[in-house]
């Protein structure tokens, strides 16, 4: 896309959504399960979901059923981006496609809601930040805790100073996965287009349906869940980039997977604290209310920040510690995604910064990429800020 076309496209898109009453036209790129969920929520909030793009026929057809009546179908996202009537796009593809699609979308004058993580490689994240700031587009990373009122309350507690000095954050996410998904393709799949920048290989349905667990496309649930947890830690602790990252893992119990399902990353920060995040997907199954935790251990109090509850425990010698502040809201997390989308749509109209900007997504991406490399190499990696690389 040349500069004249980009400027015209940007101006047309801005004009379309200048008024608060103007309906926003959106499109989904990657209409798998998460993509369809987001499509339904965008549509419920008043967005006309005018286009669906997927390289797998079954996902494309399913996505069209969820989108608005008359939505156009695409197998090449670049053709979708040529439609100047589209104001925003949702990127819900495998991780290794995120950066390229976000950059192409903002270059085409679109605002973007991109699923976490922001990218799959360190340099990609910085390239996304540069493109977004240069084109002045609105990009929201799908770390919805930043729009969740419960977490916003927790953030205010952190800022109140009640915890004292925090030098340790312990976090975990527990569940149970018995095996990889075994499924047959139901319709055509443009495998080479799906691979994109990943290494060439023969069509492999196991990889396609379980891409999370292969290094070429992601970093397992270690990355998928840490994208949320590390982002929340950064937000609460006002952190950006780490000093160093190390990572270890148990044996792989998922036949055919490359990434182990039980991992532990340790992140050192210049703000003088250590964050430890453990993923255990060979544990017992918990109610979602109890499946994850972030514990901020302060010198005066400890803040437990879970999925749908928080509790502040002041220093005490009591055997049974009692919180000085607590909120428990079972079932409250589901609306967080919708609140995050609503914030994105408001920012499309106002041109204000969204709750989860690209810089925040990039800081988390650096940690995730370092953790993946640390696990694969068995080394503790240091962050070289001036060179923007791990060493």
Image (cartoon, rainbow, N blue to C red):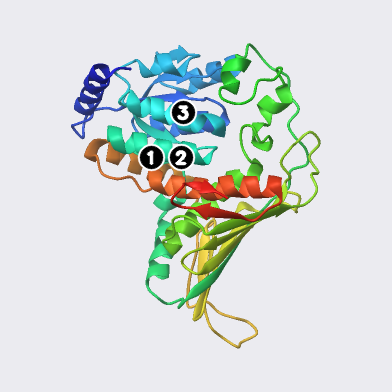
State the residue lying farthest toward the top.
188
The residues bearing labels 3 and 1 have C-alpha atoms spaced at a distance of: 12 Å
The mark total stands at 3
Q: Earlier in the sequence, mark 2 or mark 3?
A: 3
Residue assigned mark 1: 129
Image side of residue 244 versus residue 5, left or right: right
State the residue in front, 367 or 342.
Answer: 367
Residue assigned mark 2: 125
Image quadrant for the N terminus? top left
Q: Earlier in the sequence, mark 3 or mark 1?
A: 3
Asked whether the viewer can see residue 118, the reply is: no
Residue at left offset 49%, top offset 49%: 364
State the residue in front, 59 or 356.
Answer: 356
Label at residue 342: none
Quick check: 145 above or below 220? below
Image coordinates for residue 88, horizontal then vertical, percent: 35, 28
State the residue in front, 334 or 95.
Answer: 95
Tell me the crowding category of disc 3: few under 14, some 14 to 19, or many 20 or more residues within 10 angstroms, Cα based.
some
Quick check: 23 above or below 366? above
Label at residue 100: 3
Residue at left offset 43%, top offset 57%: 235
The residues bearing labels 2 and 3 have C-alpha atoms spaced at a distance of: 10 Å
Q: Element type at marker 1?
A: helix
Residue at left offset 60%, top offset 14%: 190
Asked whether the viewer can see residue 184, the reply is: yes
Image coordinates for residue 110, horizontal then vertical, percent: 33, 27
Q: Quadrant of residue 10?
A: top left
Q: Are marks 2 and 1 in contact (CB under 8 Å)?
A: yes
The residues bearing labels 2 and 1 have C-alpha atoms spaced at a distance of: 6 Å
């Amino acid at each position: 896309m040349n500069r004249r076309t980009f400027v015209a496209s940007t101006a047309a898109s801005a004009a379309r959504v200048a008024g608060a009453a103007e309906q926003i036209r959106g499109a989904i790129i990657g209409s798998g399960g998460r993509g369809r969920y987001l499509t339904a929520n965008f549509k419920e909030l008043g967005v006309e979901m005018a286009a669906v793009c997927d390289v797998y026929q079954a996902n494309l057809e399913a996505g069209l059923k969820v989108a608005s009546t008359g939505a156009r179908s695409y197998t090449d996202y670049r053709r979708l981006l040529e439609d100047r009537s589209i104001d925003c796009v949702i990127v819900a593809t495998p991780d290794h496609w995120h950066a390229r699609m976000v950059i192409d979308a903002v270059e085409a004058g679109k605002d973007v809601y991109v699923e976490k993580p922001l990218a799959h490689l360190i340099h990609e994240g910085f390239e996304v930040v540069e493109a977004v700031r240069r084109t002045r587009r609105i990009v929201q990373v799908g770390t919805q805790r930043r729009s969740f009122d419960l977490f916003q309350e927790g953030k205010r507690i952190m800022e109140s100073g009640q915890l004292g000095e925090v030098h340790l954050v312990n976090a975990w996410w527990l569940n149970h996965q018995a095996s990889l998904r075994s499924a047959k393709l139901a319709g055509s799949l443009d495998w080479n287009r799906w691979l994109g920048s990943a290494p060439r290989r023969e069509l492999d349905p196991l990889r396609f349906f379980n891409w999370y667990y292969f290094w070429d496309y992601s970093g397992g649930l270690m990355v998928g869940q840490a994208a949320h947890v590390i982002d929340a830690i950064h937000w609460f602790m006002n952190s950006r980039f780490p000093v160093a990252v190390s990572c270890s893992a148990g044996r792989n119990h998922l036949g055919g997977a490359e990434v182990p399902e039980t991992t532990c990353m340790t992140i050192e920060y210049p703000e003088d604290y250590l964050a430890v995040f453990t993923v255990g997907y060979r544990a017992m199954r918990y109610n979602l209310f109890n499946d994850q935790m972030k514990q901020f251990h302060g010198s005066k109090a400890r803040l437990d920040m879970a999925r749908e509850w928080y509790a502040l425990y002041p220093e005490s010698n009591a055997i049974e510690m009692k919180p000085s502040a607590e909120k428990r809201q079972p079932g409250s997390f589901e609306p967080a995604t919708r609140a995050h989308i609503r914030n994105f749509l408001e920012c499309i109209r106002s041109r204000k910064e969204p709750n989860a900007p690209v810089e925040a997504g990039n800081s988390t991406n650096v940690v995730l990429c370092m953790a993946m490399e640390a696990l694969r190499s068995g080394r503790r990696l240091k962050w070289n800020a001036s060179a923007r690389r791990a060493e």
